[in-house]
Amino acid sequence: QVQLVESGGGLVQAGGSLRLSCAASGSTSTINVMGWYRQAPGKQRELVARITSGGRTNYVDSVKGRFTISSDNPKSTWYLQMNSLKPEDTAVYFCYAQRFGWANSWGPGTQVTVSS
């Protein structure tokens, strides 16, 4: 099993920055994809960014050029650096870990609020 805990959320003004962290414990050596989803009120959860164990990254179009995902070896911590934040980035952010043959593991979520 893999357990995840996010940190780094909070309230920030538009144009500001936040850095989210996800700390993983348990069978972290089996993780092959790490990433972040978010869910705004009344909206579906959407994939924000992901990074593979090989370092390949993907981003949703709305955050490209503003957000950066990175991870530490040995895949125990990953980050989401969020710059130039907009009110529409307001959501609960969840980190997740994907392991081959297992259901995704999820953190409890951290609130990000961007004021205009």
Image: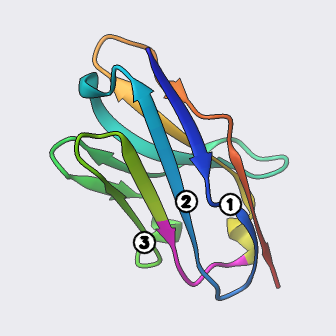
The residue where tag 1 is placed is: 9
Q: Residue furthest bottom?
A: 15
- Residue at position x 84%, y 50% in the image: 41
Mark found first going from the N terminus, 1 or 3: 1
Total residue callouts:
3
Q: Assign the magenta stretch its main secondary structure.
A: loop
Name the side, left or right, on which 33 lies relative to 74.
right
Residue 99: quarter of image:
top left
Residue 107: where, in percent of width, then height? 60, 34
Residue 9: where, in percent of width, then height? 68, 60
Name the side, left or right, on which 106 lies relative to 100.
right
The residue where tag 2 is placed is: 20
Q: How is the structure coloured here?
A: rainbow
Residue 53: where, in percent of width, then height? 21, 41
Is residue 82 magenta-colored?
yes
Label 3: few (<14), some or many (≥20) within 10 Å? few
Residue 19 visible somewhere in the drawing:
yes
Question: Is the N terminus in the top left, top right, bottom left or bottom right quadrant?
Answer: top left
The amino acid sitting under disc 2 is Leu
The residue where tag 3 is placed is: 64
- Residue at position x 53%, y 33% in the image: 4
Residue 60 visible somewhere in the drawing:
no
Contact, mark 2 vs mark 1 (Cβ under 8 Å): yes
The amino acid sitting under disc 1 is Gly
Query: Secondary structure under badge 2?
Result: strand
Mark found first going from the N terminus, 3 or 2: 2
The mark closer to the camera, 1 or 3, is: 1
The amino acid sitting under disc 3 is Lys
Name the side, left or right, on which 10 lies relative to 65.
right
Which residues fall within the magenta stretch?
Answer: 81-86
